[in-house]
Structure formats: structure tokens, C-alpha cells
């Protein structure tokens, strides 16, 4: 049960934006920096009590200036990230002592809808961890290093996983602490818990909740944002 418990949103935005060829997190999305769009949907949620943003060390000043310009001081805390995404998550989690729930969300997913936040918290309350999933439209094949098909995977059982991923705060914090000396790399936070034997639930995600990783993605995000502003999305 999460009702009445503390809920913290941890936005991870410390990547290098290699595929964008520039700093995507401050790129304009219909007149407002992409990071601000992501932060403000979480700030506007009545389910979220606190918010922490993880940025590259050299972008902390830009983050603080954005916070002042958007009226966030006192509502959003910032910290510097690490070399890998999992390092950044761990450093962000160490900024959040105590108990409750944490929503770990990509800073480059500005199209998050409030109902996804609610679904995630409800699903995580059952087993302590939950991730949003979207069914795959395409057939997926396992391919060898030589480019040959090894296996066609059952599409009906496959889902693309998004963020926010929702966790019991003490559980995911301890999982990341246990990972630090091991030197293992995980593609997302849920994979870390899975490796430790913890159950992870899947709840319905949102096909529009794309992650901006390229200039084409940014154009798509701008189009979808304009559609929402017109009341069509």
C-alpha cells in the first residue's frame, strides 16, 4: 500500500547525449527546455512529494538557473551524476534517505502522463517494484554475432519497458549499494532487482511516452506536445 507513504521522483538526466550531437536535456520543446517539461509533470502530480534531478557535474549550474526561472527552488534538489547511468541512479538515491517509494524516470521522457504515475504506484504496492511496459508491434528475432537468426521470440510475451520504474525506496537503494563493488552493468534498475531475485510487476505503459535520443525523436516529441496542447492527445 503506497497511500499515505512518501513518494519521491528521481529524474536521471546525466547522459552524454551522444546520438543527439548536443545536450538534449536542455533542448527546447515547444518553447520550454525538455528537462522542464519532464520535471513539471511530476511536480504537478499530487502523488509526488519530493523531486531529485541528477545532472552531469558541468550542467548543475544550468539546472539551478532553470529551477529559478521556472519557480522550482525549494521543490527540486539537484545532484551530480556518475560515469554510468546506474552510477547516477545510485548517487541520486543516496540523496533520498528514509523510507517510502521512488519513481526513477528518464529526464528525456517529457511526455509522461499523470495516469502512468498512478498505475505504477498501484502496481508496485503489490510486490515492491513495477515497470511500465508496451507490447511490441514487430516480430523479434534473436540474431547471432554473424548475423544469422538463432530464434524467433514469442512476441505475445515481449514488452518494451519504459520509465518511470517504481520501487520500494529502501529495496532499490540497498540493491544499488550492493552493486557498486561488483562492477556489473544493468540496462535498467528493474534488471538489477531481477538479478537479486526480487519480483517485478509490469503495468500498462504509454506508447506516446517516448525517450528522446535523436533529433528525429525531438521532432516527434514536439509534434505530440502540440497535439496535446490542442486537446487531441
Image (spheres, rainbow, N blue to C red):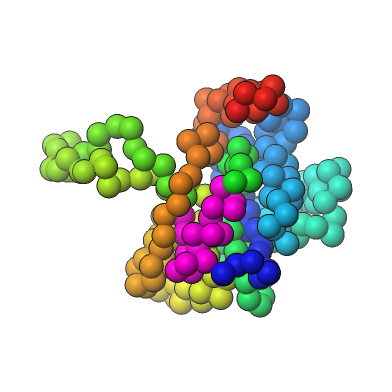
| Position of 20 relative to 187 (above/below) | above
In percent of the image, x 54 and y 38: which residue is there? 209
Image quadrant in which the N terminus is located: bottom right
Assess whether residue 130 is covered by the magenta stretch.
yes
Residue 213 can be seen in this image: no
Name the spot of residue 10 as percent of width and height, x first: 63, 58
* Magenta highlight range: 116-131
Image quadrant in which the C terminus is located: top right
Task: Tell me which secondary structure the magenta stretch mostly adopts.
Answer: helix
In percent of the image, x 45 and y 68: which residue is there? 127
| Residue 53 falls in image quadrant | bottom right
In percent of the image, x 39 and y 71: which residue is there? 198
| Position of 56 relative to 41 (above/below) | below
| Position of 212 relative to 62 (above/below) | above
Name the one closer to the observer, 150 or 62: 150
Name the one closer to the observer, 102 or 182: 102
| Residue 170 falls in image quadrant | bottom right
Amino acid at each position: 500500500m503506497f497511500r499515505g507513504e512518501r513518494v519521491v521522483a528521481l529524474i536521471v538526466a546525466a547522459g552524454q547525449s551522444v546520438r543527439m550531437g548536443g545536450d538534449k536535456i536542455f533542448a527546447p520543446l515547444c518553447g520550454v527546455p525538455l528537462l522542464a517539461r519532464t520535471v513539471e509533470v511530476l511536480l504537478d502530480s499530487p502523488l509526488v512529494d519530493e523531486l531529485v534531478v541528477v545532472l552531469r557535474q558541468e550542467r548543475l549550474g544550468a539546472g539551478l538557473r532553470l529551477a529559478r526561472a521556472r519557480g522550482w527552488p525549494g521543490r527540486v534538489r539537484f545532484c551530480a551524476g556518475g560515469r554510468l547511468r546506474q552510477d547516477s541512479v545510485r548517487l541520486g538515491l543516496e540523496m533520498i534517505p528514509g523510507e517510502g517509494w521512488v519513481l526513477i524516470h528518464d529526464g528525456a521522457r517529457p511526455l509522461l502522463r499523470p495516469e502512468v504515475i498512478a498505475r505504477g504506484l498501484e502496481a508496485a504496492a503489490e510486490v515492491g517494484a513495477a515497470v511500465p511496459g508496451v507490447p511490441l508491434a514487430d516480430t523479434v528475432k534473436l540474431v547471432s554475432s554473424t548475423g544469422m537468426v538463432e530464434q524467433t521470440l514469442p512476441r505475445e510475451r515481449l514488452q518494451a519497458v519504459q520509465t518511470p520504474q517504481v520501487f520500494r525506496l529502501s529495496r532499490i537503494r540497498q540493491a544499488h549499494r550492493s552493486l557498486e563493488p561488483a562492477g556489473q552493468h544493468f540496462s535498467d534498475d528493474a534488471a538489477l532487482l531481477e538479478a537479486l531475485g526480487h519480483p517485478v510487476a509490469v503495468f500498462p505503459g504509454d506508447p506516446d511516452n517516448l525517450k528522446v535520443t535523436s533529433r528525429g525523436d525531438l521532432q516527434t516529441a514536439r509534434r505530440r506536445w502540440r497535439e496535446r496542447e490542442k486537446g487531441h492527445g
